[in-house]
Amino acid sequence: MGEEHDGDNGDSAPDTSPVPSVTDAAAAAISSLANETRLQVLFVLWDAADRPLPFGELKRRVGIRDSGQFRYHLRKLEDQFVQRTSDGYDITSAGVNVVWAVRSGDLNSGTDAGPFRVDGSCPGCGATLTLRYEDQLLAVTCDSCGAAHGMLPFHSSGFVGRTADEVQATYERVLHTTLRLGVHDICPQCYGSGSFEVITEESDLPVDLRRELSTEELTELTHHDPAAGNVDVLWTCSQCGLWMEFPVGVLLGYRTELSAFYREHDVDFDSIPTWELPYSLGDLRVTVTDTNPPSVEVRVSLDGATRTVALEDASLLELISGVPSSDSPSEP
């Protein structure tokens, strides 16, 4: 707000102060957390069943004797991470998120685990699969051909108190849930929305994925041939940048009437190991039958039965045909 000056007519001067950017606000928030005492305040408040806590009681539990020093730290946390009420101090949702991030291990680096042998074999060569945890990514790879069969950001806290088999089961459940959210355009990390893109060349792929794949895998992934069922899709969150890659059959199996066809043939997307899912979709063919307006037909053959569906979802039509649908906003 502008200051009032003698002789003004009572109107406030316009506020010309710059609005903090998202990065400025984030930097300020991170700076206010850069102290062990302040983090301890958040831990104590989150763990307290009797919060809000009076100033003196909170200070005692944190273990600080100097009231002035403790008050200084509290002021750094107030409003964003800690709220002051008539009954004392409580933690905000943002403060809880900080506690979760710290205790889940997300802010720590250098924790690796495995390899663990996976209960299954490589769909490509039949060799043993292993589960490895490096740089907070849990991935299933083949020991023999080196193929990557799945990769998932994973909290290091997911290993605590679990056997190798239980870690694998956790990985599978989390990855299935992540996949289901992604195909419905919901980011499992930040709940933002994103965009789908058909992969046609190597530059379409995220750097992280290109590093994980062999030359042969990159060639296969970018071999775009709808008539032969070779269509791979990349989904990227527009907010946090999280990405997922999956065959178009997985996307169609979740979002079209093909899901009923797969259920009829005991193809349960949520129970099939994720590394086997792309190989469990049968013989899939995609045909762009018209471009004005866009029209796409999908045929799946499985166990001697065939189902053909015409896509009706405008966003799927546009994605697969490469032609903007009539529901897409027109350029001004």
Image: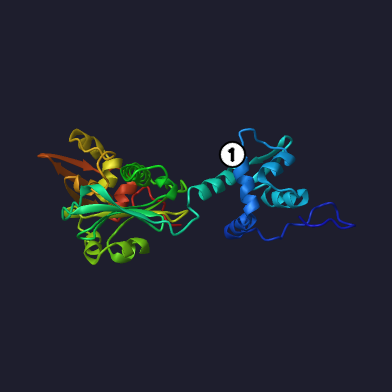
Q: Choose top left, top right, bottom left or bottom right for residue 8.
A: bottom right
Total marks shown come to 1
Q: Choose top left, top right, bottom left or bottom right for residue 216.
A: bottom left
Compared with 241, 157 (above or below) is above
Compared with 131, 301 (above or below) is above
Point out residue 36 in the picture as x, y percentages from the top left corner: 62, 54
Secondary structure beneath dot 1 equals helix
Residue in view at x 76 percent, y 50 percent: 66
Point out residue 95 in the picture as x, y percentages from the top left corner: 59, 46
Looking at the picture, tell me which residue is in the foreground, 110 or 262.
Answer: 110
Q: In this view, which residue lies farthest toward the right?
A: 6
Residue in view at x 23 percent, y 35 percent: 260
* Crowd class of label 1 (few under 14; some 14 to 19; many from 20; radius 10 Å): few
**Relative to 29, is 171 on the left or the right?**
left
Name the residue beneath numbered marker 1: 47
Instruction: Tell me if I can see residue 235 in this picture.
Output: no
Quarter of the image containing the N terminus?
A: bottom right
Point out residue 277 in the picture as x, y percentages from the top left corner: 24, 46
Residue in view at x 70 percent, y 52 percent: 73
Q: Amino acid at mark 1?
A: Asp
Q: In this view, which residue lies farthest toward the left?
A: 304
Point out residue 298 in the picture as x, y percentages from the top left corner: 20, 46
| Colour mapping | rainbow
Residue in view at x 33 percent, y 60 percent: 209
Q: Choose top left, top right, bottom left or bottom right for residue 42.
A: top right
**Relative to 138, is 258 on the left or the right?**
left
